[in-house]
Amino acid sequence: MNPAEADKRQNEIYRKMPGEKRLKIALNLTNLTNKLMIAGIKDQMPGLSPAEIKKQIALRSDQ
């Protein structure tokens, strides 16, 4: 299966899911993205305070 076929199949699966399940998946992906962003910030700029981390999140989210 090539990437285009996989994408089409994934979309078919999502369309058949109840809205609540799709929402749960979206929220889980958002949470994972946020955790990865925070981990990246901490790795690139060790020693930042929680307030400084929030500022970095805001800066990266606005881009």
Image: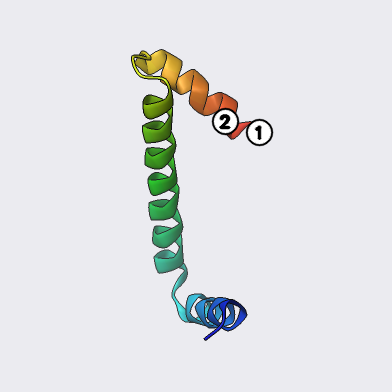
Q: Secondary structure at mark 1?
A: loop
The residue sitting at the bottom extreme is 1
Q: Amino acid at mark 2?
A: Arg
Question: Which x, y percent locates residue 10?
Answer: 51, 77
Please say if 32 is above or below 59. Answer: below
- Colour basis: rainbow
Label 1 with label 2: CB-CB less than 8 Å: yes
On screen, residue 11 versus residue 20, left or right, reads: right
Quarter of the image with the C terminus is top right
Question: Which x, y percent locates residue 9?
Answer: 53, 83
Q: Amino acid at mark 1?
A: Gln
Tell me the residue that label 1 is attached to: 63
Q: Residue at x 48, y 80 (%)?
A: 13
Using a 10 Å C-alpha cutoff, classify the residue at mark 2 as few (fewer than 14 neighbours), some (14 to 19) or many (20 or more): few
Using a 10 Å C-alpha cutoff, classify the residue at mark 1 as few (fewer than 14 neighbours), some (14 to 19) or many (20 or more): few
Question: Which x, y percent locates residue 47?
Answer: 33, 14
Residue situated in front as seen by the camera: 46 or 62: 46
Residue situated in front as seen by the camera: 31 or 60: 60
Q: Secondary structure at mark 2?
A: helix
On screen, residue 13 versus residue 2, left or right, reads: left
Question: Which x, y percent locates residue 5?
Answer: 58, 83
Q: Residue at x 36, y 34 (%)?
A: 39
Q: How many marks?
A: 2
Please say if 5 is above or below 36. Answer: below
Q: Residue at x 41, y 14 (%)?
A: 51
C-alpha gap between disc 1 and disc 2: 6 Å
Q: Which mark is residue 49?
A: none
Q: Quadrant of residue 44?
A: top left
Q: Which mark is residue 60?
A: 2
